[in-house]
Amino acid sequence: MTQELGTTEKELIENRLRKLEEIKALDLNPFPSKSDRDITINELITKKDKFIAEKNEVTVAGRLMAKRGHGKLIFCDLEDESGKIQLVLRADLVKAKDFELVSLLDVGDFVEAKGPVFVTKAGEFSIEVHETKILTKAIRPMPEQWYGLKDEESKFRKRYLDILLNPAVKELFYKKAKFWQATRDFLIKKGFLEVETPVFENTAGGADADPFITHHNAFDMDVFLRISMGELWQKRLMVAGYEKTFEIGRQFRNEGISREHLQDYSQMEFYWAYANYEDSMKLVQEMYQFIALKTFGTLKFKINEFEVDLSGEWSKIDYTQTIKEKLSIDVFKATDAELKTKLTELKIKFNPSDKRGRLIDTLWKQIRKSIAGPVFLINHPVEVSPLAKRKEDNPKLVERYQIILAGSEMGNGYSELNDPIDQNKRFEEQAKMRADGDTEAQMHDNEFVEALEYGMPPTTGFGFSERLFSFLADLTAREAQIFPLMKPEK
């Protein structure tokens, strides 16, 4: 890489601005609207024997990533999204203006080059440039030319540079695209219809979460950004006569940031009529194994120091029995005061105003941290599952399951509650919790209850978020998001 004049970022920018004016003085446009590229670098490399034999000229374009000058001979590395190739420029093979242009190019500039391919004496496949053209003059130097992207904050804030300079980061987001495409392909192959449901809602429903609020100017009313992937809307579609639907999209929860949590992220949810949670578990196990193989090429992962194998049949563990075994408390018999005492003994933080369901769930989350999985967590108490159908043989429990993987919840499904009377009562209980200060308790949705009153068939639903991808990649949620939200720089 040739050394640019200047040592500070300001000096390097000033030097590039001077070169920009010199390029314009050559009567060249440093920001043209079009390139005549006729082949990608990877296509060229793949068919290099053919192009060497035929000696045809090709036109490539990309970003200049290195430049090495030797008098009237200059070598450059040109990179597009597909790959990298060496350009060889000789003063006697290009127009004088083109060679003068090359002297004004810097690492980071976008360039077009035309000429035949050949193999150098050093054995490197290259393009002998006969014509060149500037496509974009980069005003700022690449980070490695001055300070570099040294800290995580800079990498997230200038993710485009992190991707540009780090092939592993670029590959990560190819994998993330494969992850969601594999999800989509699996469900469509199983007969599910992809749908789109509202992002703005009058009532934020389908999850226990604190919503974001915004104002709708046309209707002059406040609305919520959705906290689930259209759960209550997709159930309406079951009422409407659809039998298999799914949605992949963005949802929003106004909660804290952690290794596993972000405020806006991608989620998938499906709903399946005439099936229950046991049918759903079988489908989901198959789906996770399909997605893992398609995305990562393996079923074995190391996640947060856990060794995780997604192959085979996944075992089941009992929610309340596990709490009893691990923490020596029976959540069915314990009073709210006793639940709070146990949490205090274990030094687990909780809100004194938390209701029974929240207290029980807080206890469970302490146990979850030590489970490698994959396992299905089943037999949840009704207090922690306001949208799930009760078990016929034990109305204190619901037909629900969660996937536990590497100490965290990695998916949630159940047999959907379709009794409008029961649903209304549970919404009323949740409303009381909200009135008492639980901002994550669910809102009462009268319109959804009305839809259920028209009749919804037996239905199972399930959802997972992009947390699954970040875990399989063994990264934090922020690392696995292409542009995580950042506070403005001061």
Image: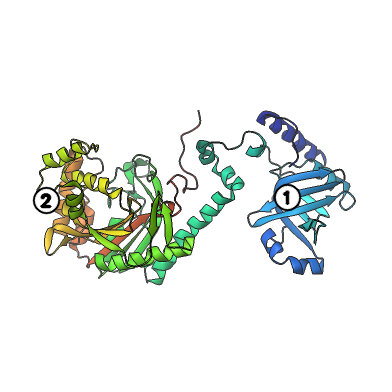
Q: Amino acid at mark 2?
A: Phe
**The image quarter in which residue 150 lies:** top right
What's the residue at 50%, 57% (across, down)?
175
| Side of 339 where 244 appears, left or right | right
Q: How many marks?
A: 2
Name the quadrant of the N terminus: top right
- Residue 450 image offset from top left, x and y in percent: 20, 58
- Residue 350 image offset from top left, x and y in percent: 23, 37
First along the sequence among labels 1 and 2? 1
Mark 1, Cα crowd under 10 Å, few <14 / some 14-19 / many 20+, is some
Mark 2, Cα crowd under 10 Å, few <14 / some 14-19 / many 20+, is few
Q: Secondary structure at mark 1?
A: strand
Q: Amino acid at mark 1?
A: Asp
Disc 1 from disc 2: Cα separation: 68 Å
Q: Is residue 443 visible?
A: no
Q: Nearer the viewer, residue 274 or 197?
A: 274
| Side of 479 where 160 appears, left or right | right
What's the residue at 31%, 48% (across, down)?
369
| Side of 419 where 482 appears, left or right | right
What's the residue at 81%, 69% (across, down)?
54
Q: Is residue 156 above or below residue 200?
A: above
**The image quarter in which residue 351 lies:** top left
Report the residue marked by disc 1: 77
Report the residue marked by disc 2: 332
Q: Is residue 38 above or below residue 225?
A: below
Q: Is residue 385 above or below residue 181?
A: above
